[in-house]
Amino acid sequence: MKTAITNFITKTTEIDWVPLNEEGIDTTGIYVKVLRYDEQQQRPPSILLKFEPGARYPYHNHPGGEEIFVIKGSCFVEETVLQEGDYLYTPSGFKHAVRTDKGCELMLVIPDEVEILEK
C-alpha cells in the first residue's frame, strides 16, 4: 500500500482540461479534470468542471447526492444562481439542470453515477 502523501496529491495545474464526453448527451463547452478515480466504481467521484459561456448540463438525478463548490464565475442550478465561493450540497435524489451565461469552474463530489433524465 502506498503511504507517502505525495501519492495522493493531484496537481491540477499540471492536468489539461479535456472535453467532457458522455454518450448521447450534448456536453458542448464543458471540460473536465479528474481529481480522484475510484477503481472499485470505475469512475471519478471527484472532478473539476469548466463550463464555457452558454454551456449547460441536462436535467439529471443524483442518487447519492452531490457537492458543488464554485471556484470561478457563476452558474444556475435550476433558477438559483451560484457565484464564486458558493457551496451547494444536494441530498440523495436531488434533480436539477446546470447552466451558465458567463462561464464557470466548479469542483464536484459525486458519490454515485448521475442519472440523465432529459437529453
Image (cartoon, rainbow, N blue to C red):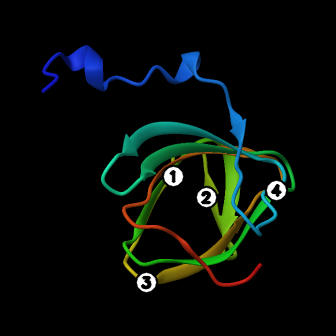
Task: Identify the amino acid type marked 2.
Answer: Leu
C-alpha separation, residue under disc 3 versus residue under disc 1: 21 Å
Task: Determine which of the numbered discs, if any, sits on residue 86 in the image.
Answer: 1
Numbered circles on residues, count = 4
Task: Identify the amino acid type marked 1.
Answer: Asp
Q: Earlier in the sequence, mark 3 or mark 4?
A: 4
Q: Earlier in the sequence, mark 3 or mark 2?
A: 2
Foreground pick, 76 / 33: 33
Say which quadrant the N terminus sits in.
top left
Position of 79 compared to 7: left or right? right
Kindly identify which residue carries mark 2: 82
Position of 112 compared to 4: left or right? right
At x 47% / y 67%, what residue is drawn?
113
C-alpha separation, residue under disc 4 versus residue under disc 1: 19 Å
Q: Position of residue 28 (x, y in %)?
A: 84, 53
Q: Earlier in the sequence, mark 3 or mark 1?
A: 1
Kindly identify which residue carries mark 4: 55
Q: Position of residue 76 (x, y in %)?
A: 69, 65
Q: Quadrant of residue 119?
A: bottom right
* Disc 2 and disc 1 in contact, CB within 8 angstroms: yes
* Disc 3 and disc 4 in contact, CB within 8 angstroms: no
Q: Earlier in the sequence, mark 2 or mark 4?
A: 4
Q: Earlier in the sequence, mark 4 or mark 1?
A: 4
Q: Label 3's element?
A: loop
Kindly identify which residue carries mark 3: 93
C-alpha separation, residue under disc 3 versus residue under disc 4: 24 Å
